[in-house]
Image (tube, rainbow, N blue to C red):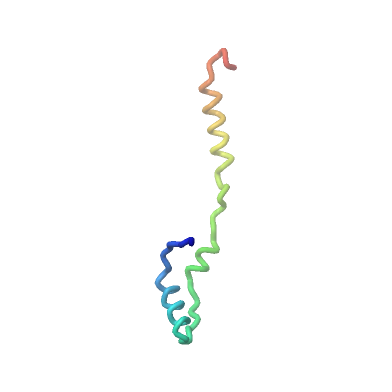
Amino acid sequence: STLTVFNVAEDAQKELLALASGKAVPMVPDDTVIEAEVVDDPLKGVQEIAFERIKDQINSLDWSEM
């Protein structure tokens, strides 16, 4: 058998236990979901980093390697 070990958030744990016992669970809007949707561009600054890396590699070459 395969076992999965994970930690459930406290709010999710309360909701799951309430659903398992047959109790109604009120839906409460969560502000953290809105914050999670705002994601910075993961490729931001990649071009500048690549340019600097290429420049460093060129600067490290010997005269005979050029």
Query: Image point 55% across, 44% down: which residue?
Result: 45
Query: Image point 47% across, 86% down: which residue?
Result: 22
x and y percent of residue 41 in the render? 57, 52
Quadrant of the snapshot with the C terminus: top right
Query: Image point 56% across, 39% down: which residue?
Result: 48
Query: Image point 46% across, 87% down: which residue?
Result: 23
Q: Quadrant of residue 58?
A: top right
Q: Quadrant of residue 37?
A: bottom right
Asked if residue 53 is positioned above or below residue 24 in the image, the reply reads above
x and y percent of residue 24 in the render? 48, 86
x and y percent of residue 40 in the render? 54, 55
Could you tell me how many numbered marks the image carries?
A: 0
The residue nearer to you, when weighing 57 against 23, is: 23
Residue that lies at the very extreme toward the front in this rendered image: 1
x and y percent of residue 31 in the render? 48, 71
Q: Quadrant of residue 18?
A: bottom left
The residue nearer to you, when weighing 26 against 64, is: 26
Residue that lies at the very extreme toward the bottom in this rendered image: 23
